[in-house]
Image (cartoon, rainbow, N blue to C red):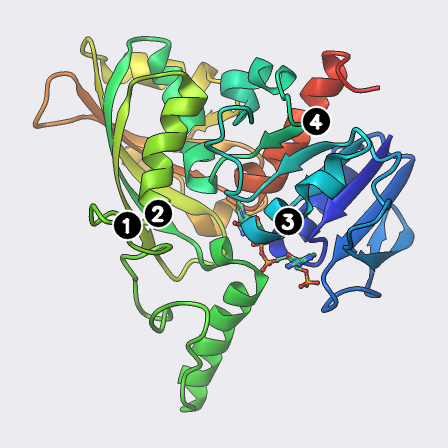
Amino acid sequence: MKVAIVGASGAVGQEFLRVLEERNFPIDELVLFGSPRSAGTKYAFRGKEYEVKLLQHNDDFKGVDIAFTSAGAGTSKEYADTITKYGAVMIDNSSAFRMDEDVPLVVPEVNAEDALKRPRGIIANPNCTTIQMVVALKAIEKLSHIKRVRVATYQAASGAGAAAMAELHEQYRQILAGEPVTVEKFAYQLAYNVIPQIDVFTDNGYTKEEMKMFNETRKIMHSDVKTSATCVRVPALRSHSESIWVETERPISVEEARKAFAEGEGLVLMDDPDNKVYPMPLFLAGKDPVYVGRIRKDLTDDNGLTFWIVGDQIKKGAALNAVQIAEYLMKAGDLK
Ligand SMILES: NC(=O)c1ccc[n+]([C@@H]2O[C@H](COP(=O)([O-])OP(=O)(O)OC[C@H]3O[C@@H](n4cnc5c(N)ncnc54)[C@H](OP(=O)(O)O)[C@@H]3O)[C@@H](O)[C@H]2O)c1
């Protein structure tokens, strides 16, 4: 298997190297790509050094079986034809193709088989907040159809990339040293703050991130579910948290929900309020599953249930989800 990683120097690219190594993914040949900024940089994988090549419109993708791309939507759009020209399957982490009808949008725990139909050779990895939410929603949907979702997210700095995570570290250092605070990656200082804006605003007052949660959830779940989201950046470094309210067709008891979450694929139940047990981002960074806790009946709606989830958005929300898609294709005999 010849594997390419486009955007190898980034937060997601580096996670790809860790996840592929951790899962012992079958790789005979690995090629790393980046912009002029990281071209020539070397990264270790399974004890060997690999140099980042400059991404160009040439034949570098000849012979590549899978290309994991995480270099932003603009780069994905510009290079998709070059990457897929010789038959490589492009598993793309950007928002470039997610809502295109001829591109499947896949979370293996929910709709793995959609990955088998990919006329353009492209499979899109959903938005990170949506990935972790639908893994949890799937467990409830099995019990009763979910009609509405209301969600507030608490998104870590690293969701905006490696440089954003570094900026949060630097802001705390600058504050403690009494220095002026650098604000480049976010609209405002994030240290000691929360920012109720992720991505740009659209005409209806919701941000693009919030509209991704509405649209992508429907596509992945093949559902008419409506999602109303408020996405907030918080000064956590890694792992997104979400407070979720669902309205189902029939009432679901807390006990039923607990059982469904405990048995749900890709989920871990972490719900023991008497002992202060609930998921928190600080302690769950680097973990594979989505953790669920604080499960309660919604006090305003008999058919409502509310719960809290935490997932590592660089891992399950990006690199791991993409690698799981590739593993599914291999298992299905859909890759050589
Ligand atoms: N961070 C997350 O939690 C997360 C989660 C899900 C999805 N995503 C998506 O994944 C993508 C990458 O995010 P990230 O957080 O890893 O960002 P990042 O840390 O800022 O890294 C961006 C990567 O893209 C590469 N790149 C940029 N322009 C390029 C070009 N013209 N040609 C080749 N490589 C180029 C960069 O390489 P150089 O260093 O060489 O410039 C770098 O490796 C984005 O589309 C993002 O929306 C991120």
Of label 1 and label 4, which has the lower sequence position? Answer: 1
Give the image quarter of residue 292: top left
Say which of marks 1 and 4 sits in front: 1
Q: Would you place residue 147 above or below residue 208 in this image?
A: above
Q: Which residue is mark 2?
A: 208
For the C terminus, the quadrant is: top right
Q: Which residue is mark 4?
A: 326
Ligand 1 within 8 Å of disc 3? The answer is yes
- The span from disc 1 to disc 2 (Cα, nearest Å) is 6 Å
Q: Which mark is residue 78?
A: 3
- The span from disc 2 to disc 4 (Cα, nearest Å) is 28 Å
- The span from disc 2 to disc 3 (Cα, nearest Å) is 21 Å
Mark 2 near mark 3, Cβ–Cβ under 8 Å? no
For the N terminus, the quadrant is: top right
Most foreground residue, 128 or 86: 86
Say which of marks 2 and 3 sits in front: 3
Ligand 1 within 8 Å of disc 4? The answer is no
Of label 1 and label 3, which has the lower sequence position? Answer: 3
Tell me if 79 is positioned left or right of 77 in this view. Answer: right
Q: Which residue is mark 1?
A: 202
Residue at 19% from the left image edge and 8% from the top image edge: 250
- The span from disc 1 to disc 3 (Cα, nearest Å) is 24 Å
Task: Please indicate, yes or no, whether residue 63 appears anywhere in the rendered image.
Answer: yes
